[in-house]
Image (cartoon, rainbow, N blue to C red):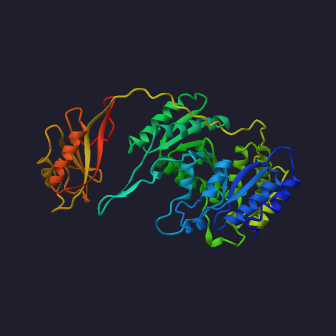
C-alpha cells in the first residue's frame, strides 16, 4: 500500500505534471485516517490527479494515532496550522479509541472551524446499484454545530443524567437560509423542514418559526414542514416526494444515514461540511478497521466527497469528468462487493475500482444522467449578517429548583410541605415535576418517580436575584440537596419557559 507520506512526493505529483495546466494549484489538507482510510484515500487521490484536479495536498495526522498520543481531540497543533492555512480538508474515516475521555473529532472540527452546514446528497443509481427507489434524488442539509451535539451533559443524581439541547436563533437562520439558497442555486424546486416542535415547542419551535419566516422570502420555491418521525418514515418509503430537506443536527445525522442506505449504500455517500472560512469533505461511513489492508473497501463515498470539494474550490470541470467516469464505471458493472448485485459484471477491490474510473475519464454514461459542467459554477455565498436585534423586555419572574431527593416513599406532597415551610410570600411553590411529569399538586399515584425533582417557584411579578438567593438560603437550612437552578424569564411578556399544568 502506498504510504500517505510518500504519495504526494511521487505518483500524485507525477500525475499532476501529466495534466499540468497554467492555473495555480489549490492547497488542501488531507487526512488519511484509520482502518480503510489510507486505502480509499490513496485511491481517491489517484483519481483526482488523473482527472486533472489542480491540488497541492498537505498531509496531516488526525485520528487514532493522535488520540493515543494523549491528545483527547484527535487533532494536534500542526494539523490545525495546516487547516487554517488551506481552509479545505479532505478527510478519510477515523477510529476513536474505545473508552471515555476522547472527544469526537468531527464535532471538534465542525465547531472549531464554524462548519455550520452539512450537505449530503442522496441519489439512487438504479439499476446498477440495487435499490427499491430508483427515482430517489434528494439533498439533506443538516445544522452542524448545535442541538444535543453541544455535548453539555451532567450526572445530576444517582439515577438521572441530563443532556442540554441548545438551539440558537442565528444557528437556525444560517442553516435555513443556506437551504433555500442551495435549492435556488442548484435548480431544486422544494425545501422541506423536519422538526419535533409538537413536543419541543421552544427549541424545535424556534427552528420551525425561522423556517417559515425565511421561506416567505423565496416565493419561487415550494416549502413545507413535517414532524421528523413521519418525515423519516416517508423518506424511507417515498423518498421521491422530497427534494431538499433541512433539519436540526441530531435528526439530520440519523436521517442522512437512513437516506443513503435507502438510495443503495452508505458506502456511496459523501458529505460536505461548509463554513464561512473553511470546509471539510468526507465519506459518511466509518473506518471499518476489520477491513483494513484487504483492498476490498469501496472508495466511492470519499470520491463523492472529493467531487463536492472540487466544486467548492472552483474546479467544476475536473469534478464533472470524474463524476461521469464514476457513473460509467457503475454502468459497466465494475463493482466492489458492498454494491454487488444483478448488474455486477466484474467484482473488484479498492485499487482496481480506481483504475476503472481512471480508464473511463472523458466518457459519458449511457443510461444514468450525465453531469453537465457549468463554467459559472461557484461556491454558495456564505456571507451572513444578522440585522440589529430589536429591543426586548426581559423580566425575571421565578426559578426552577432541582433536587436529588429519595426520602420515604418519594411522596411529592412531603417534599412540597418541606419547601412550603421555608418559601417567601413573594416567591411561592407552584408545582413539582418528576422527569417532566406533574406530580404535585394533583399528581397521579401511578406516575413512576425517580430521585430527580423540579420545583417551580413563581412571584407575583418581577423578581429580584436577591429574592432567589434568599429562597436558596432558606432551602439550604432544610438539608435538602438542590443540584441546579434555572431562572424563569418573560420576554415582552411571553413566558420563556415551558408551562406545566395550571401554569
Q: Where is residue 68 in the image (x, y as percent from the top left)?
A: 56, 69
Answer left or right for 402 relative to 247. left
Answer left or right for 83 relative to 237. right
Q: Where is residue 180 in the image (x, y as percent from the top left)?
A: 59, 35
Camera-nearest residue between 134 and 196: 196
Q: Is residue 441 above or below residue 69?
A: above
Residue positioned 40% across, 50% down in the render: 164
Q: Farthest residue in the right direction? A: 18
Residue 127 in sight here: no
Residue positioned 70% across, 59% down in the render: 59
Camera-nearest residue between 179 and 111: 111
Q: Which quadrant of the figure contains the C terminus? A: top left
Answer left or right for 251 relative to 376. left
Residue positioned 79% across, 48% down in the render: 25
Answer left or right for 204 relative to 354. left
Picture mark count: 0
Q: Which quadrant of the figure contains the N terminus? A: bottom right
Camera-nearest residue between 60 and 193: 60
Q: Position of residue 253 (x, y in %)?
A: 53, 53
Residue 368 in sight here: yes
Q: Where is residue 102 in the image (x, y as percent from the top left)?
A: 50, 63
Amino acid at each position: 500500500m502506498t504510504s500517505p507520506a510518500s504519495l504526494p512526493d511521487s505518483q500524485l505529483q507525477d500525475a499532476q505534471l501529466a495534466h499540468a495546466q497554467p492555473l495555480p494549484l489549490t492547497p488542501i489538507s488531507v487526512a488519511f485516517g484509520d482502518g480503510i482510510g489510507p486505502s480509499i484515500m490513496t485511491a481517491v487521490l489517484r483519481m483526482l490527479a488523473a482527472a486533472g484536479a489542480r491540488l497541492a495536498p498537505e498531509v496531516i495526522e488526525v485520528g487514532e494515532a493522535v488520540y493515543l498520543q494523549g491528545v483527547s481531540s484527535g487533532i494536534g497543533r500542526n494539523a490545525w496550522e495546516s487547516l487554517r492555512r488551506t481552509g479545505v480538508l479532505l478527510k478519510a474515516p477515523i477510529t476513536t479509541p474505545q473508552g471515555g475521555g476522547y472527544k469526537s473529532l468531527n464535532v471538534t472540527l465542525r465547531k472549531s472551524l464554524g462548519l455550520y452546514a452539512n450537505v449530503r446528497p442522496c441519489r439512487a443509481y438504479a439499476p446498477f446499484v440495487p435499490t427499491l427507489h430508483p427515482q430517489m434524488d434528494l439533498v439533506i442539509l443538516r445544522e452542524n454545530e448545535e442541538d444535543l451535539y453541544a455535548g453539555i451533559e451532567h450526572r445530576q443524581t444517582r439515577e438521572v443524567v441530563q443532556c442540554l439541547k441548545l438551539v440558537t436563533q442565528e444557528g437556525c437562520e444560517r442553516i435555513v437560509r443556506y437551504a433555500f439558497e442551495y435549492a435556488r442555486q442548484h435548480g431544486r424546486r422544494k425545501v422541506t423542514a423536519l422538526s419535533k416542535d409538537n413536543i419541543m415547542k421552544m427549541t424545535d419551535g424556534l427552528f420551525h418559526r425561522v423556517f417559515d419566516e425565511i421561506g416567505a422570502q423565496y416565493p419561487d420555491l415550494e416549502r413545507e414542514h413535517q414532524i421528523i418521525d413521519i418525515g423519516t418514515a416517508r423518506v424511507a418509503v417515498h423518498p421521491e416526494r422530497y427534494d431538499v430537506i433541512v433539519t436540526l443536527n441530531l435528526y439530520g445525522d440519523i436521517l442522512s444515514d437512513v437516506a443513503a442506505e435507502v438510495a443503495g449504500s452508505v458506502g456511496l455517500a459523501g458529505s460536505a461540511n461548509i463554513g464561512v472560512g473553511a470546509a471539510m469533505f468526507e465519506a459518511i461511513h466509518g473506518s471499518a478497521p476489520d477491513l483494513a489492508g484487504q483492498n476490498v473497501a469501496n472508495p466511492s463515498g470519499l470520491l463523492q466527497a472529493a467531487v463536492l470539494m472540487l466544486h467548492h474550490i472552483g474546479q467544476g470541470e475536473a469534478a464533472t469528468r470524474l463524476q461521469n467516469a464514476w457513473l460509467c464505471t457503475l454502468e459497466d458493472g465494475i463493482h466492489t462487493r458492498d454494491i454487488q448485485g444483478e448488474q455486477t459484471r466484474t467484482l473488484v477491490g479498492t485499487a482496481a475500482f480506481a483504475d476503472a474510473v481512471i480508464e473511463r475519464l472523458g466518457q459519458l454514461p449511457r443510461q444514468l444522467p450525465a453531469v453537465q459542467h457549468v463554467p459559472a459554477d461557484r461556491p454558495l455565498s456564505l456571507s451572513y449578517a444578522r440585522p440589529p436585534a430589536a429591543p426586548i423586555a426581559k423580566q425575571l419572574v421565578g426559578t426552577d429548583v432541582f433536587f436529588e431527593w429519595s426520602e420515604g416513599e418519594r411522596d411529592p406532597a412531603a417534599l412540597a410541605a418541606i419547601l412550603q415551610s421555608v418559601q417567601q410570600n413573594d416567591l411561592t411553590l407552584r408545582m413539582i415535576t418528576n422527569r417532566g411529569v406533574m406530580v404535585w399538586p394533583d399528581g397521579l399515584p401511578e406516575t413512576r418517580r425517580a430521585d430527580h425533582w423540579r420545583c417551580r417557584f413563581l412571584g407575583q411579578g418581577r423578581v429580584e436575584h436577591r429574592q432567589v438567593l434568599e429562597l436558596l438560603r432558606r432551602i439550604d437550612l432544610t438539608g435538602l440537596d438542590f443540584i441546579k437552578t434555572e431562572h424563569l424569564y418573560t420576554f415582552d411578556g411571553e413566558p420563556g419557559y415551558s408551562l406545566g399544568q395550571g401554569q
